[in-house]
Amino acid sequence: MPLKLLVTLHGEELAVELPDSAFVLPAGIMSFEAWIKQVGRSRTTGFEWRRAGMIETHDICGRPYVTQDAVVKFLERTRAGEFAATK
């Protein structure tokens, strides 16, 4: 089941569906910045997600990275509606 996101582009809200393949990390670990680009979100949104504890990151030489397990957990929590603005 694809993940559905609402994205604002040039002041217009668009519904975007991300396939499950967007959440598979080829090496099991990826820089957080590369992953956030892969899911189509801004660096600011990524920072907010990290700060809010929505996705777990690991510091490697001063740069944040995500693991496959963290991405799967994020996806499960998202599908469960944990981060929905209204429940």
Image (spheres, rainbow, N blue to C red):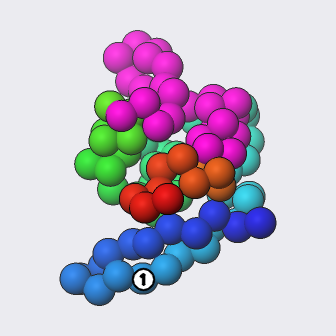
Q: Residue 51, image x and y in percent?
A: 32, 31
Tally the marks. 1
Asked if residue 36 is positioned above or below residue 2 in the image, the reply reads above
The residue depicted at 70 percent of the width and 30 percent of the height is 69
Q: Residue 74, image x and y in percent?
A: 60, 41
Asked if residue 59 is positioned above or below residue 68 in the image, the reply reads above
Name the quadrant of the N terminus: bottom right
The residue depicted at 31 percent of the width and 39 percent of the height is 47
Q: Residue 86, image x and y in percent?
A: 43, 61
The residue depicted at 44 percent of the width and 17 percent of the height is 59
Q: Specify the farthest residue to the bottom.
A: 12
Is residue 75 rendered to the left or right of residue 35?
Answer: right
The residue depicted at 61 percent of the width and 44 percent of the height is 77
* Residue 29 visible in image: no
Q: Specify the farthest residue to the left.
A: 11
Q: Which residues are magenta?
A: 52-77
Neighbour tally class for label 1: few under 14, some 14-19, many 20 plus, Cα within 10 Å = few
Is 54 within the magenta? yes
State the image quarter where residue 33 is shown.
top left
Asked if residue 39 is positioned above or below residue 9 in the image, the reply reads above
- SS category of the residue bearing label 1: strand
Q: Residue 31, image x and y in percent?
A: 50, 35
What amino acid does circle 1 point to?
Answer: Leu
Q: Specify the farthest residue to the right.
A: 1
* Residue 58 visible in image: yes
Is 72 within the magenta? yes
Is residue 52 rendered to the left or right of residue 80?
Answer: left
Q: Nearer the viewer, residue 61 or 43?
A: 43
Query: Residue under circle 1?
Result: 14
